[in-house]
Amino acid sequence: MMNQSAGDREERSRLTELWSCDIIGTRPEAQFDELVRLAAGLCQAPVAAVSLVDSDRLWFKARLGLPVDELNRDGSFCDVVVTSRSALLVENAALDPRFSRSGLVCGATHVRAYIGFPLTMHSGAVVGSLCVIDTEPRAWSELQREAIRVLAAQVVAHLELRRANAELTQLWEDHRALETRALTGTRDDQRHLAAELHDGLGQDLTGLSLLVKALRRSTQEPTTQRELLRIEQLTRSAIDSCRRLARGHLAFGFKHGSLRESLEQYLGGVNDLRGVRCELVWSTTVALRERTVAYNLYRIAQEAVTNAVRRSGGDTITVTVAERDGTLRLQVDDNGRGMADSDGGDGGVGLETMRFRAQAIGGSFTIGPCDPRGVSIRCDVALPSSRSSRVRAARPPA
């Protein structure tokens, strides 16, 4: 009885892991379809699938040569892979007492040979299998076995990456909500927020960062590694934001209601600490009263200046804020090496963050060359009197 209870708990835990991927019933995705085609091609077999084993069914995230997208779990080959937590190789199912009476063998599917490797998540839970099927009896070579094992690991990497993206999206939204509260809350609220950031969101982000780092080390597939590196960089950036907020540096030096004063103070600090000449050019006609717009413009300027200091190699940065025809423009120019040499490292993360903030306030974001050399970053946002609609709700970068 105790063994049965332990088995039930393990199955519930396995299903929880599968459901946390939020993938059952989703549309086809190219990365899974490509792995299935590759598996079938390497084995020279007509059927292959990424099979996710739900409570009572097999659901195929990707399939080749199968007319349906789900099958009953009972008595299936993939169920054996999941319950045994190990690979399954069948050379002639008609002669195998475990499967000889199965509808998959006796029916129209006419399964004869099967090879399947478990999809084992980072937690150890097996959520399904990558399988290849032939309608004729056959032996599976050592090379084919190794190929399916490696491809199964790639399927898992994509599943973990997909989930990490979803978790990062939610954590980013939580971070933005806390950031907004920090801008508008009282001193007591801010103390509570600091605790939430350090003990709650900060710890969650740290855990996600460690998971993504482990996943990046476990896969050799270049596209997956690049995506995992991007998520890891975004997560580190968010962790840094949380720490700075928790230490009391709310709004990262932004003075409520004063974009000009905040930029002057920030650029003065860059001049003192970095040895780079930063200049603020402020149009006398600018009158910005929306705190959210001012704050996000400040953060865009901060990110643009930071990128220029770290990567451009120039010695002069000019931040211009001007209004024309109901549109406010923030422009950051440097005299560095230019775009070809300035977009290394995690610069892509910085650009995504700036685009995200521009979108959050209903603005446009552009980046281009600066005359005669360097990079020019611009954010244009319509002032309240000329806006035709409310500012769109912010969403994290894709």
Image (cartoon, rainbow, N blue to C red):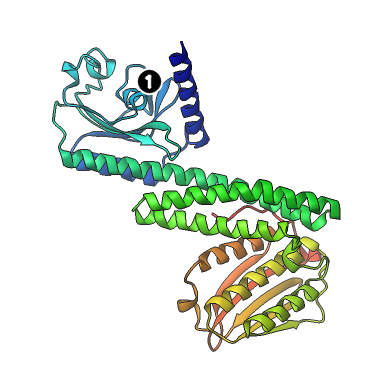
State the image quarter where residue 297 is shown.
bottom right
Judging by the rendered image, the residue that carries numbered circle 1 is 73
Q: Is residue 278 left or right of residue 258?
A: left
Q: From the viewer's side, name the closer residue of 113 and 209.
A: 209
Q: From the viewer's side, name the closer residue of 394 and 172.
A: 172
State the image quarter where residue 278 is shown.
bottom right
Instruction: Say which amino acid is labelled 1.
Output: Arg
User: Label 1: how many residues lie within 10 Å, few (<14), some (14-19) or many (20+)?
Assistant: some
Quadrant of the frame with the C terminus = bottom right
Q: Is residue 6 left or right of residue 289?
A: left
- Residue at the outermost front position: 2
Q: Residue at x 71, y 64 (%)?
A: 296
Q: From the viewer's side, name the closer residue of 249 and 340.
A: 249
Q: Position of residue 99 (x, y in %)?
A: 24, 17
Q: Residue at x 42, y 38 (%)?
A: 121
State the image quarter where residue 245 is shown.
bottom right
The count of marks equals: 1
Q: Position of residue 310 (x, y in %)?
A: 55, 76
Q: Position of residue 116 (x, y in %)?
A: 28, 32
Q: Is residue 323 visible?
A: no
- Residue at the outermost top position: 1
Q: Is residue 127 visible?
A: yes
Rendered position, 127 above or below 323: above
In the structure shown, which secondary structural element does the residue marked by tag 1 occupy? Answer: loop
Q: From the viewer's side, name the closer residue of 127 and 37.
A: 127
Q: Residue at x 57, y 66 (%)?
A: 350
Q: Residue at x 25, y 16 (%)?
A: 98
Q: Position of residue 329 (x, y in %)?
A: 70, 74
